[in-house]
Structures are given as C-alpha cells and as structure tokens.
C-alpha cells in the first residue's frame, strides 16, 4: 500500500506545475499554465536578468536565493515568475508549485512532502502580505530559513507583493509609536523580508514603455491596425484607467482583439 502511494506521488510529480491544496494536503497538477513569453514582458529588463540567472542556477542544482518581487501593481511580477518557469521547464526538471496566501500556515507540511523528491520545486505565492493579528508569517519565516530541518535543498520560494516588507506601513508606524522600544516592536515582522536573498523592485512604467508593451502584443498576436491609430487608442485606454502598466496594456489588447474579431491564443 505504501509503495502504491509513492508510485502515485511520482506519477503526479511528473507534471511541471501544481497548485497546493492545503485541505487534504496534496498537489494538484496543472495541465496548462497561463503565461506570457518572456519577450513580451517589457520594462522589467533588470529584474528579468537577475531572476532568470537565480532560477537557472537553482534548476541546475546549484545554490540560489529566495526572491521577493515587490512594487507597483500590474507591472509583471507574477507574469515574470511564470514566464521564467516556462522557459526553463522545457529543458530542466524545474517544477512550479503555487501556494495561496491563505495557505501559508500549511507551508511546513508542503515542505515535508517535497523534501528529497526528484526534481527542483519553485514555490510561488502571488500577492503575499500580512495584516494585523495575522501570525501565519511565522510559518513562512521558519520555512525560509529557520527550523532544525531547514529549507529543503530542492525547494526555492518566490513571492510577489505590493509591499516591500510585506506589512502595511500604517501597521508598522502604529507599533513604533505605541511600543516601549519602537524598533524592536516591528523587528520581527520586518525581518520576514530579510529572509529573501533577492529583492526585486518593480516601478510604474513610462508612456514609452507602455506603448512598447502594446506594440509587442500587437506584433506577437498579429493584430492589424495602423501604428498611429494603435497608439491613440492605447493612450486613451490608459487615460481612462488612470494608469499605465503591463496589466493595463494587456487589458487594452484584449479589448482591441475583441473589437477586431481576433482570438488570442497564449
């Protein structure tokens, strides 16, 4: 019976991507990951090079750092993680495992499951942050570096967040103002981000970068529209949203493709 269970687990781990289902404590294979090719991600060149090299080393079996991708909304943080995985999974044993923010407390259980298993596992948590009274960050701290077992050598952790220190600014400032020792009061919470060896910042894009994103999508999907008309529509779209970002550019492309009667296949 035990051998059968191990055989089933090996079969499941043959996939290249999974979602962690914390309830029953199992990995659910993802047959097709929604991702964009790396060349379509504009305005993130520096972060792309650093994260690609870090991930390549890990996939090859060498030491690498946990990474925190933080900053402006919609600038391709999660898209970059998925695109890099897709680029490397074709020729390595790198596997992507998504763990939801609300399941962080179950991370030690997931690490025990993956420890010693064949393959290299990139754990990914999108939009990670912690609010007041939330203590699940302690599980993440222990999993990243602490504990007597330590992080398994075949596991790396990537997270995206709008917050550099994963905590609300007003929460940290409040604790500083009310504590006897204001710096020690927030040291434990801030030290969570210190567990990430790589901090990669993402910032709002310029108008030129935004239009470069739009141009890249149009060329990739073969949308027939004159450049001047394209840029006028794209700028009007971003003005209506009050923002310029990779997400806004992608939403514009979806609207444009629908208007042109073109189906987008990723």
Image: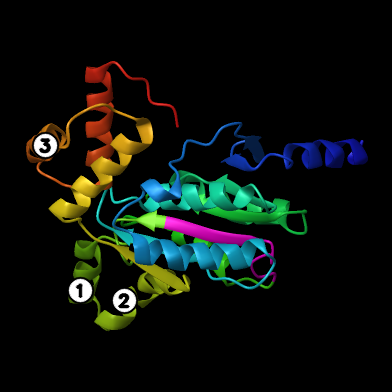
Q: Are marks 2 and 1 in contact (CB under 8 Å)?
A: yes
| Marks 2 and 3, how far apart at CA | 55 Å
| Callout 1 secondary element | helix
* Residue 228 circle label: 3
The spot of residue 201 in percent (x, y) is 31, 65
- From this view, report whether residue 7 is shown above or below residue 257: below
Whichever of callouts 2 and 1 sits on the residue coming sooner in the sequence is 1
Residue 21 in view, yes or no: no
Corner quadrant of residue 224: top left
Q: Residue furthest top?
A: 261
Element type at marker 2? Answer: helix
Which of labels 2 and 3 is toward the front? 3
Q: Position of residue 234 (x, y in %)?
A: 15, 37
Name the residue that disc number 2 marks: 185
Q: Position of residue 120 (x, y in %)?
A: 68, 57
Q: Is residue 199 magenta?
A: no
Is residue 169 shown left or right of residue 152? Answer: left
Residue drawn at x 77%, y 59% as measured from the top left: 116
**If the image is split into quadrants, where does the C terminus sit?**
top left
Q: Which residues are magenta?
A: 149-159
Task: State the image quarter where residue 216 is shown.
Answer: top left
Identify the residue at horizontal 43%, vertical 41% (top origin): 36
Question: Local crowd at mark 1 within 10 Å, few (<14), some, or many (≥20)?
Answer: few
């Amino acid at each position: 019976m035990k051998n059968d269970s191990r055989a089933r687990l090996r079969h499941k781990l043959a996939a290249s991507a999974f979602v962690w289902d914390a309830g029953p404590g199992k990995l659910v294979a993802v047959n097709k990951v929604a991702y964009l090719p790396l060349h379509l991600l504009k305005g993130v060149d520096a972060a792309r090079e650093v994260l690609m090299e870090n991930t390549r080393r890990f996939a090859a079996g060498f030491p690498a750092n946990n990474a925190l991708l933080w900053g402006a909304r919609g600038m391709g943080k999660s898209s970059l993680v998925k695109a890099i995985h897709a680029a490397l999974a074709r020729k390595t044993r790198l596997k992507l495992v998504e763990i939801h923010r609300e399941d962080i407390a179950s991370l030690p259980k997931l690490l025990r499951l993956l420890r010693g298993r064949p393959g290299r596992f990139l754990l990914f948590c999108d939009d990670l942050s912690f609010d007041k009274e939330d203590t699940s960050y302690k599980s993440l701290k222990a999993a990243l570096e602490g504990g007597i077992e330590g992080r398994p050598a075949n596991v790396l952790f990537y997270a995206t967040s709008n917050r550099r220190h994963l905590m609300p600014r007003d929460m940290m400032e409040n604790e500083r103002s009310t504590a006897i020792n204001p710096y020690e009061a927030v040291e434990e919470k801030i030290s969570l981000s210190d567990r990430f060896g790589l901090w990669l910042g993402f910032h709002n894009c310029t108008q030129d970068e935004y239009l470069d994103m739009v141009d890249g999508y149009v060329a990739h999907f073969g949308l027939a529209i004159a450049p001047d008309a394209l840029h006028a529509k794209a700028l009007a779209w971003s003005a209506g949203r009050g923002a310029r970002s990779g997400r806004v550019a992608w939403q514009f492309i979806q609207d444009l493709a629908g208007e042109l009667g073109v189906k987008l296949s990723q």
